[in-house]
Amino acid sequence: GQQVQQSPASLVLQEGENAELQCNFSTSLNSMQWFYQRPGGSLVSLFYNPSGTKHSGRLTSTTVIKERRSSLHISSSQTTDSGTYLCALERTEGADRLTFGKGTQLIIQP
Amino acid sequence: GGIITQTPKFLIGQEGQKLTLKCQQNFNHDTMYWYRQDSGKGLRLIYYSITENDLQKGDLSEGYDASREKKSSFSLTVTSAQKNEMAVFLCASSIIGGANERLFFGHGTKLSVL
C-alpha cells in the first residue's frame, strides 16, 4: 500500500488565502522532507528533518513523528506559490533513501 | 552554491532503443540518485550511489542500468525504451544520504518514446 499519503490531491485558492497541505505515513519513520516543484521545474527542499514546528517565511511545517503526520501551512498565498508540493519520508529501516508521496497540486488564482 | 545539470533536457526515442541520461553535480556530494516521476504516481527511486563506482538498486531498477563513473557524475540508461512511455527522470544529490541531509535536484530529463 501507499506508505506516504498526501491530501488534498489538488487545491485551488484565491490569492491571499491560506493553504493547508497534509502528509500522513503508514510506516514508522526516521524523518521526512517537504519539497516544492514549480511546473516543469526541479524540486526544491523546503523543510528537511523537521520535528515539531518550523518556519520559513510564509511557510510553516508541523511534524508529529509519533502520530506519523506532517502538515505544510502557507499563509497569505501568492500566485507564485502555485506548483506541486511533495512530502517524502525516510523509513526507520532499510537503506538511506526517501519514499515520496504523490504530491498536492496547488493553484493560486489572482 | 552548486548546481546539478541534467542532459539532455528532452529525449525522444524509438521503441526498443537504449537511451542514456547524464547528470553532473558540482556540490562535491557523496550520494547521487535517479528518480522517475510519472503523472499521478509521485517519485520512484531507480538507482542511487553512495560513492564513486558504487551502485544500489532502488524500487524501480528493472529495465535500467546506471553508472557512477566519478564522484561528480551519475548516468542512467534505459535498456529498452517502451512504446508510448512518457516520464520525467530526476537526478539528485546529497552530502551523505538520509533524512538529515537536504536533497538537491536537477531540472529533469523529459522522455517520450514514439
Image: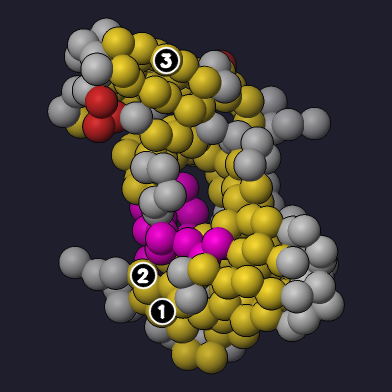
**Residue range (magenta):** B95-110
Within 10 Å of disc 2 (Cα), the crowding (few <14, some 14-19, many 20+) is many
Q: Quadrant of residue A102?
A: top right
Within 10 Å of disc 3 (Cα), the crowding (few <14, some 14-19, many 20+) is few
Tell me if I can see residue B37 in this picture: yes
Rounded to the nearest angstrom, the CA distance separating label 3 from label 2 is: 31 Å
Q: Secondary structure at mark 2?
A: strand
**Residue type of the residue flagged with mark 3:** Val
Q: Quick check: is B77 in the magenta stretch? A: no
Q: Quick check: is B104 in the magenta stretch? A: yes
Q: Which mark is residue B4?
A: 2
Q: Is residue A85 above or below residue B30?
A: above
Whether tag 2 and tag 1 are in contact, CB under 8 A, the answer is yes
Q: Are marks 2 and 1 on the same chain?
A: yes
Q: Residue at x 80, y 31 (%)?
A: A1
Callout in the foreground (3, 2): 3
Rounded to the nearest angstrom, the CA distance separating label 1 from label 3 is: 36 Å
Residue matched to label 3 = A12
Q: Which mark is residue B24?
A: 1
Q: Secondary structure at mark 1?
A: strand
